[in-house]
Amino acid sequence: MLRQYELVDRVLGYDPDADEALLNRAYVFSLQAHGSQKRASGDPYFSHPIEVAGILTDLHLDDETIATAILHDTIEDTVATPDQIQKMFGDNVARMVDGVTKLSKIEAQSDTERAAENLRKFLLAMSDDIRVLLVKLADRLHNMRTLHHIEKPEKRKRIARETMDIYAPLAERIGMYEFMKEMQSLAFAQIEPEAFASISKRLDQLKEGGGDRIAKIGSGLKLLLSRAGVDADITGREKHPYSIWKKMQERHISFEQLSDIMAFRVTVPTEEDCYRALGIIHRRWPMVPGRFKDYISTPKRNGYRSLHTSVMHAGDTRVEIQIRTEEMHAEAEYGLAAHWAYKSGKVRADTQHSWISDLVEILETAESAEELLEHTKMAMYQDRIFAFTPKGELHQLPKGATPIDFAYAVHTDLGDQAVGAKINGRHVPLRTIIENGDQVQILRSKAQAPQPNWLNFAITGKARAAIRRKLRLTERKETLTLGRKLYDEIVQRLPAPLSVDAVKTALKKLKLADEDALLEAVARRRITDAELMEALMPGSAGTDAGRALPQQSAVSITGLTAGVGYKLDTCCHPVPGDRIVGLRRPDEEIAVHRIDCPVLAKSDDADWVDLAWGDKAEGGMAQIEVTLKNEPGALGTVSTIIGQHRANIINIRFDSSDTGFHTNQVDLEVRDVAHLEKLMTALRAADAVNAVTRP
C-alpha cells in the first residue's frame, strides 16, 4: 500500500501545482473514517481506496480526482456524511464522491433486483463529470485484482461476469484498452477457469519450445528500423488468454489453428515516422492481405489512432504490428483519461470537461446497424435520469420528472394515492424535480385522489394519462350527482306523478341511450328543463309548474373539486361560508360565484343554480387587495400577520402605486369566510396597512 508521502509525491511528480494539502487531508480523513475495517484478504480496508488512487496516478489525473479516489467509499461504508466531505474538500470532490457512491448502491442490489442494462444505462447517464467514471473503473480494476480473496466461488463468478459485461466494455468504449484488457483477463479466469488454464498452459509450452521468440523478433524489428534511420521503441507480447479464447470462439478454430498470437507495438517520434516504419516493414516481410488498417488518417470513433498490419515473419509466423507515436500510445492505452491528462506531462486545466461531449464525437458515425442502434440508445439516455425506490429498484424517467411521475412509474395505484414524497430522506413537494441517482419514497393515502394541478408538473405520458383518466371518472361521477339532483327537482315540478314507463319513453324521444346519459345531459344543459318535462309528461311544459324559475332549489354540494365537475370562478374566489350561486351553460362546468359577484348581472345566457356549501366543505383560495404605505418592512408586516393567522400565501402580485402607497393583490388559502374576515380585520389594524378589500 502506498504511504501518504509516496502518494503525494507521485501526484506532484507530474503536476507540481497540485493541492498537496487537499491530498493529505483526504488521506488522513479516509484512514480515520475506515478505522479497523478489513477486506476479504484480511488487509486494512483503507488499503483499497489508496490503491485505487495509485492506479489513477498512473493516468496522471488531477488532485481532485485522486482525492475522490481516496474518499470514494467513506460515505457508503463509514459514518462520514456528504456535508463533511463538502465542507472539508469542496463542491467538486463532494459531487464526485456522491456519484461514485450512487454507482455503488446499484452494485449492492440483490441478484434478483440487479439488472446489467440498468447499470449500463446509469453509467451512461453520469454526464456531469467523466472523472466519476474513471474512479469507478479504477475501483473495479483493483477489486478484480483482489477477487481471489473472496471465498464463495459463485460471488467471484458474479462479480467477474458483471465486469466482463459492463465495466470492460465501458473501458473499451472510452478507449481505455489497458483497463479493458486486464479486466477481461482477470474476469475470464473466474468465468471460464478451465479454458483459462488450458490456454495459459499452451502459451507456456510455446515459450518453452520456441525459446524467447518475442525477444528475438523484437530485436530483429528494432535493428531493421534503426538501419533505415527510424528511432523506434519495440514492445512485444503474446495476446492474453481471453483474447485468444475469443478468437477461437468467433472463428470456430482450435488453438493450433491460430497463427497470430504475437503482437508488437512500434513507437516512433512523429506521425511521418509511422508511415516510414510501415513501408520499411512491408518491404522486409509480406503483408497478410486484408489485415492493414490506417487509424491515423481515419481514427476510430473513440479517438484511437494507430497503424495496424500483420506480416508473415520468417515465412511461417504471422505477427501483428501496431505503429504509433507516444501521444497516440497514451491515448490508445488510457483513452479519454489521456485526453484529460496528456499535455507534456501536465494535467489539463479544463477539469469541468464533460465526457458526454466526447461520447457524442465517439458515436457520431456507426460502422454497422447494430452499432448504430447501440449508439442511438446511448444518446437517448443522456435525456434520462435514474432514480431508486427505498428497496433499491431502479426506474428510468425523463429529465425534469417529479415524484408524481416516479409514483406512476412504480404503479398506477401509488400515483393515484400520492400525498407527498421524500427524496433522499427529506420531505419535498410533489412538484420537486428528481435528480439523477436520487432515492424517492412516495407517501400515500387511500383517501387521496389525483388533483387537476398535478398536470402542471407531471411530464411522463403514463402519469398524465392516468391523472386525466381519474379526473374524467371523478368529473363524470360528480356530473351524474348534479344531474340527479337537478332531474329530481324538475320531476317535482311536474303536475302529476310519473308513470312506470315514462322515463323509457322520454329516453327514446330525446334519443338518449340510458338514464346516465339523461342525467349528464341535464347537468350539462344539453336539454332544457322544458324539453325534459315535455318528454316525461307531454303538455306539462306549458303549465305554471313548467315555467322556468329565476332561481332553482338549493343543491348542497360537499367539497367542490376545482377543475372537475365544477369550478370556483377566479373573478370572485368564493370560499366556504360565502353565499354562492352556480351558472350552468351547455357543455360547460358549473361556474361557482359569490352571490354579489358582478359577473352574475351579465349572465342572461346561463341558468342559475343556487348552491350551498356542504358540511364537509374544506378551505379555498381567496383574493384580497392590500394597500400599503411605501415604507421598508410594510410587506413583511403583512406576511407576518397572515402567518400568525395560519393562512397560506399562494401568490403576491404588485398591482399599482400612488404617492406614498402601493397596492398588491394577495392570493390566500383560508378555512372559510369567517377566517378570512378575521384576517382582514387584523391587517386593517396594522399601521403599515392603509386599506384591505376583497374584490
Image (spheres, grey):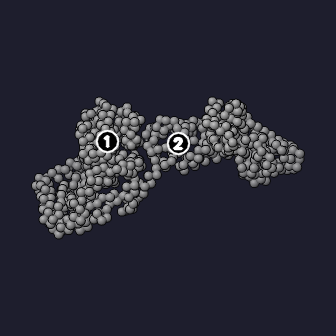
Q: Could one spot residue 236 in this view of the protein?
A: yes
Which residue is at the front of the view, 452 or 243?
452
Name the residue rendered at 54%, 49% in the picture: 459
* Residue drawn at (57%, 41%) of the image: 416
Horizontally, is 678 left or right of 299 in the view?
Answer: right
Callout 2 amino acid: Thr
Give the number of the disc on residue 241. Answer: none
Tell me: 201 left or right of 451.
left
The reply to whether residue 555 is in sight is no
Q: Which amino acid, mark 1?
A: Asp
Q: Nearer the viewer, residue 583 or 154?
A: 583
Secondary structure state at the residue bearing disc 2: loop
Q: Which residue is mark 1?
A: 19
Query: Left or right: where does residue 491 sit relative to residue 204?
Result: right
Q: CA distance from mark 2 to mark 1?
A: 37 Å
Percent x, y of residue 549: 84, 44
The label number, if any, that marks residue 432 in the structure image = 2
Quarter of the rendering containing residue 695: top right
